[in-house]
Image (cartoon, helix red, strand yellow):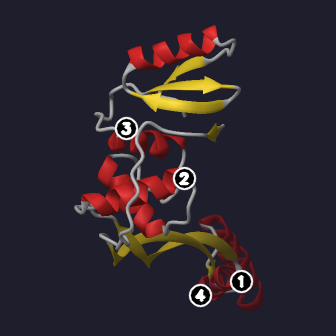
């Protein structure tokens, strides 16, 4: 929906400056990874020991030989068996994060809000500062909620106060907190043969 006019219009020529700043923030996470290790399951080791014992007894025909064969057989089974296990390691990730701050210069703030609502180019950092100042989520993207909050701020309205907009053919003619004034305009347009609609907190 195109914006034709708003209730509050201010023209200022000051150049806005950043209020927020960047800082490095780090966090440590447990990251899983796969690793292949030697050493099979207990049943494989036991099976290898039995086979080794049989071979040892056949070769030496003595119990001592069987015992030695069992040890050797178990060791071989343990050495040749492999399995994949999941392990974890700590990984530290650092990012450069912008921390917004309130814009205390009222003239600069009004300039930024008007520029943003008019679709002019404003840096992401300054946009986040403005969003933080007027009390909306500061993601650096100027959407309908940010625009509405800016209109209320410029009209000296509380964030939860309603803002009424008069719309003709999908074009906003005027926005105002005064519903009576908006209603009078609607009646005047109707007498002139122009149909219009009133929207509350148009986004």
Mark 1 crowdedness (10 Å alpha carbons): few <14, some 14-19, many ≥20:
few
On residue 118, which mark appears?
Answer: 2
Q: Quadrant of residue 40?
A: bottom right
x and y, in percent, of residue 43 in the image: 64, 65
Residue at figure coordinates x 70%, y 78% from the top left? 81
Q: Earlier in the sequence, mark 2 or mark 4?
A: 4
x and y, in percent, of residue 170 in the image: 68, 29
Q: CA distance from mark 2 to mark 3?
A: 15 Å
x and y, in percent, of residue 51 in the image: 73, 76
Residue at disc 4, secondary structure? helix
For label 3, the residue is 152
Residue at figure coordinates x 42%, y 46% from the top left? 9
Q: Is 195 displayed left or right of 158 in the figure?
A: right
Q: CA distance from mark 4 to mark 1?
A: 25 Å
Question: Which circle, 4 or 1, is nearer the viewer?
Answer: 1
Q: CA distance from mark 4 to mark 3?
A: 94 Å
Q: Quadrant of residue 34?
A: bottom right
CB contact under 8 Å: marks 4 and 1: no
Q: CA distance from mark 2 to mark 1?
A: 72 Å
Q: Earlier in the sequence, mark 4 or mark 1?
A: 4
CB contact under 8 Å: marks 2 and 4: no
Q: Earlier in the sequence, mark 4 or mark 3?
A: 4
Q: Quadrant of residue 130?
A: bottom left
Mark 3 crowdedness (10 Å alpha carbons): few <14, some 14-19, many ≥20:
many
On residue 80, which mark appears?
Answer: 1
Residue at disc 2, secondary structure? loop
On residue 64, which mark appears?
Answer: 4
Q: Earlier in the sequence, mark 3 or mark 1?
A: 1
């Amino acid at each position: 929906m195109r914006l034709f006019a708003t209730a509050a219009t201010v023209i200022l020529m000051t150049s806005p400056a950043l209020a927020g700043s960047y800082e490095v923030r780090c966090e440590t996470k447990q990251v899983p990874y796969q690793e292949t290790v030697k050493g099979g399951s207990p049943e494989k080791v036991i099976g290898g020991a039995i086979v080794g014992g049989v071979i040892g007894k056949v070769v030496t025909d003595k119990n001592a030989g069987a015992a030695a064969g069992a040890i050797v057989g178990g060791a071989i089974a343990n050495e040749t068996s492999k399995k994949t296990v999941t392990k974890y390691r700590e990984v530290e990730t650092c990012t450069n994060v912008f921390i917004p701050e309130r814009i205390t210069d009222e003239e600069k703030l009004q300039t930024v809000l008007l520029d943003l609502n008019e679709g002019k180019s404003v840096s992401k950092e300054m946009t986040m500062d403005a969003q933080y100042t007027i009390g909306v989520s500061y993601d650096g993207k100027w959407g309908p909620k940010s625009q509405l909050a800016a209109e209320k701020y410029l009209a000296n309205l509380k964030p939860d106060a309603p803002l009424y907009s008069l719309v003709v053919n999908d074009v906003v003619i005027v926005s105002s907190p005064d519903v009576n004034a908006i209603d009078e305009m609607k009646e005047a347009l109707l007498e002139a043969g122009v149909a219009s609609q009133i929207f509350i907190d148009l986004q």
